[in-house]
Amino acid sequence: MGNTISKRNRSKKAKYAENKSEELFEPQPISSNDSTVRYSGGRRYFYEQNSLSLLPNDEREIKRIYNTHYCLKEIFQTNFTAPVKQQLHNGCQVLEFGCGQGIWSLDMAQEFPQSKFIGVDADNIFKKNEFENIKFVQANIFDGLPFEDDTFDFVSMRRLLSCFTMKQLETIILREIARVIKPGGWLDWTEYGFNMQNSGEVTEKVIKGMCNMMCAHAINPHLPLMLPKVLTYQALWKNIIDHQRLVVLGSQGGEMGRKILENSVEGLYSYKKVYLEFTSQDSEEFDKDLETFFEEVERFGTMNEWHRCCAQKI
């Protein structure tokens, strides 16, 4: 399933940044008193044995993730695509895996007060909240999630592209997620990456460099395009549906397009440390390329694919 999101065909009711939750859930300052925290180039990174640590995990990055949450919500017109809305209204058990500060759970808990939400992350950066139906748990999936088999009716996970290698996803992550979902329960998996259309010369150079850098870390940069294939290969899922959105970046995509472009450039900048370690490019050239990337996207009306795949546990 797919369609193009631009300023010409967006719903009149959908206006970016007008969600009431956005005013309630501002990013929270992050504590640095943790042995797993390292600093490089003024950015905070989470380090542990199995972590790739390609992206920083600091207040600047958390703000970008918050912005991404609201972009995703408007692009897909919902926080989830699995057919679990009635269950959520009735009350069910929900897990957000890799929750960060938990913006998705906070937003969902407000909308579905009858359901119980648990957010899990390896890094203890959870936001304090006053919702009785949310609990945050620090846990490393490589040690096994601290839940019994068949616990959750619904699991959401998003933006795992830079967190795990393909081998880790296929042999550990998805199997452990499947273990804690009830038979007949649902998974929602959202990814977006580097598949661009209508891109300029420097944009293609930047994207190619990012893809090569990820491949060097055993990450498949085309994972967003492969979600149904990966889940099918697992043989643990049925009723697999891929929801695709082709998003127009920059001013040609309206207010949301401008916001997503700014967020995308910020995301590319977040990879700067790892990118420069991988390439022979210097910092000044990298910054100049990102400026040109922004200009080219605006000029050509570059589009980016976003994917949300839902699947039911067998």
Image: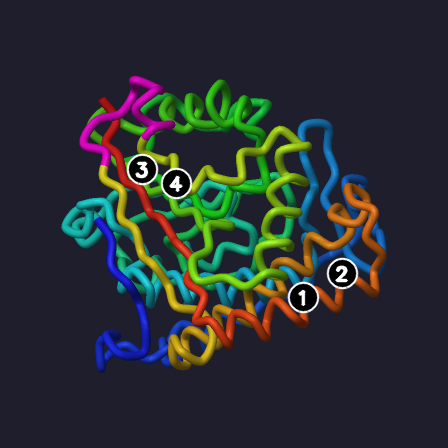
Tell whether label 1 touches label 3 (CB within 8 Å): no
How far across and down, in percent of the image, does residue 94 sit?
34, 43
Q: Residues within 10 Å of mark 2 (few under 14, many from 20)?
A: some
Tell whether label 2 touches label 3 (CB within 8 Å): no
Separation of marks 3 and 2 at Cα, in angstroms: 37 Å
As displayed, is residue 10 above or below residue 88?
below
Residue ID for mark 2: 286
Mark 3 or 2: in front is: 2
As displayed, is residue 2 above or below residue 75?
above
**Which one is nearer the viewer's eye here, 122 or 273?**
273
Question: What amino acid is at disc 3?
Answer: Leu
First of labels 2, 4 by sequence position: 4
What quarter of the picture does the C terminus occupy? top left
Disc 4, SS: helix
Residue ID for mark 4: 225
Q: Is residue 204 magenta?
A: no
First of labels 3, 1 by sequence position: 3
Question: What amino acid is at disc 4?
Answer: Leu
Mark 3 or 4: in front is: 4
The residue depicted at 44 percent of the width and 24 percent of the height is: 176
Separation of marks 1 and 2 at Cα, in angstroms: 6 Å
